[in-house]
């Protein structure tokens, strides 16, 4: 009887061991599969987010390059808000005759599906009393924004029979001369020329006591009103050392996210047409492309942004080729920091 009981006990113990072994093996398999799936999901999400980050950087660099009149990015950084969402920030500044003045940052939020949002500056625009002149300011800095004019628009407007349904032409401003009343300051002025000039003609035309910061491509179409563009001016920032120089292209090998010089502008405009983020600016991008020349020496520009001492900027309204002057940022001259010009 005792042997029979011992035998049953042995069988029960073996069965228990077998079940425990099966449960242990099953649990181990479950853990391994779970870890493998989790690693696979993590790897897929990481790869996908890296791809979206690269696309966001590319769109950022294109937008910063073609739509930045005297505005330059200083740094870019990410802020990860979740495993599948991040924000890319581009810190920016203006060069006012060697003074670095802070400018609102640009941000874009992207997820696994691509870009889901971006901050855009909605400029404050209002009409001066008893005139057809406009004032434009930046709501964040409360500084004036320099604006350009479409020289051809007034003539085109006059030729239209339905003029009452169109934007009345903005009267050209001549604000530079008023800077003589603001001594011991540096300023920024947008110059709209009476026609488009070559790069070399502009360098020879402007006095050496002002700094050329930016070259504006201008508008090809006559029917673009200056107050309808939202100010996404297309052009090229000059070298920041005060010489006002541009380059045609660089001899250095550039990746797809880098854009330099006049040839870089052509490359950026071609790529911008295919980007959903810039869809609202496609008409201006296409308009700018119609004005591009084979190289910088043949290129022509409709205006520039210059900076310098206010007393030097005040004289620019006297230049024969200047159609309009419009003031932007101003900043006091400090005794411890000498301007470039």
Image (cartoon, rainbow, N blue to C red):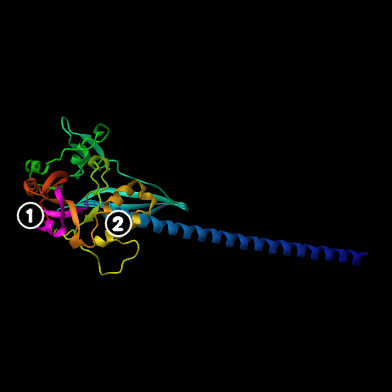
Query: Is 40 left or right of 8, judged from the image as shown?
Result: left
The answer to which quarter of the image holds residue 229 is top left
Nearer to me, 341 or 196: 196
Judge by depth and name the residue closer to the eye, 196 or 328. 196
Q: Specify few, some or many for label 1: CA neighbours under 10 Å numbering under 14, 14-19, or 20 or more.
A: some
| 139 is higher (above) or lower (below) than 233 | above
User: Quick one: which residue is furthest to the top in this view?
Assistant: 130
Tell me the magenta residue range: 192-217
Whether residue 75 appears in magenta in the rendering, the answer is no
**Which x, y percent locates residue 237?**
21, 56
- At label 2, counting other C-alpha atoms closer than 10 Å, the crowd grade (few under 14, some 14-19, many 20 or more) is few
Q: Is residue 270 above or below residue 324?
A: below
Q: Position of residue 99 (x, y in %)?
A: 17, 53
Residue at 37% x, 50% y: name it.
Answer: 277
| Residue 188 visible within the image | no
Q: Residue furthest right?
A: 1
Quarter of the rendering occupied by the C terminus = bottom left
Which residue is located at x 34 percent, y 65 percent? 255
Q: Nearer the viewer, mark 2 or mark 1?
A: 1
Residue 214 is inside the magenta segment: yes
Q: Is residue 180 left or right of residue 59?
A: left
User: Does residue 133 sit above or below 184 in this rendering?
Assistant: above
The quadrant of the picture occupied by the N terminus is bottom right
33, 236: nearer the viewer: 236
Q: Quadrant of residue 136?
A: top left
Above or below, 229 relative to 251: above
The residue tagged with tag 1: helix, strand or loop?
loop
Q: CA distance from mark 2 to mark 1?
A: 32 Å
Q: Which residue is at 25% across, 67% downward?
A: 250
Q: Considering the numbered disc 2 on the image, is that residue within a helix, a strand or a loop?
A: strand
Mark 2 = which residue? 75
Q: Which of the numbered marks, if any, corresponds to residue 207? A: 1
């Amino acid at each position: 009887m005792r042997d029979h009981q011992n035998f049953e006990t042995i069988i029960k113990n073996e069965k228990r061991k077998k079940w425990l072994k099966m449960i242990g093996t099953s649990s181990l398999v479950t853990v391994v599969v779970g870890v493998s799936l989790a690693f696979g999901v993590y790897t897929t999400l990481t790869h996908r987010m890296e791809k979206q980050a690269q696309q966001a950087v590319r769109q950022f660099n294109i937008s910063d390059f073609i739509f930045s009149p005297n505005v330059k990015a200083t740094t870019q950084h990410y802020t990860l808000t979740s495993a599948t969402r991040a924000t890319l920030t581009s810190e920016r500044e203006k060069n006012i005759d060697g003074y670095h003045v802070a400018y609102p940052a640009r941000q874009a939020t992207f997820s696994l599906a691509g870009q889901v949002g971006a901050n855009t500056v909605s400029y404050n625009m209002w009409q001066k009393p008893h005139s057809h002149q406009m004032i434009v300011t930046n709501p964040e800095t409360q500084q004036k924004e320099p604006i350009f004019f479409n020289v051809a628009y007034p003539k085109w407007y006059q030729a239209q029979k339905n003029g009452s349904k169109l934007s009345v032409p903005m009267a050209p401003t001549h604000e530079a001369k008023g800077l003589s009343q603001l001594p011991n300051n540096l300023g920024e002025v947008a110059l709209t020329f009476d026609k488009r000039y070559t790069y070399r003609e502009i360098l020879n035309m402007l006095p050496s006591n002002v700094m050329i910061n930016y070259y504006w491509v201008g508008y090809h179409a006559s029917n673009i009103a200056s107050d309808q563009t939202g100010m996404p001016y297309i052009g090229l920032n000059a070298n920041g050392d005060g010489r006002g120089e541009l380059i045609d292209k660089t001899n250095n090998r550039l990746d797809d996210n880098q854009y330099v010089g006049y040839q870089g502008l052509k490359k950026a405009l071609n790529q911008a047409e295919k980007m959903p983020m810039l869809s609202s600016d496609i008409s201006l991008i296409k308009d700018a492309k119609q004005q591009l020349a084979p190289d910088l020496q043949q290129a022509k520009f409709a205006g520039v942004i210059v900076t310098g001492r206010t007393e030097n900027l005040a004289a620019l309204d006297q230049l024969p080729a200047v159609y309009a002057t419009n003031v932007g940022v101003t900043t006091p001259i400090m005794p411890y920091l000498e301007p470039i010009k």
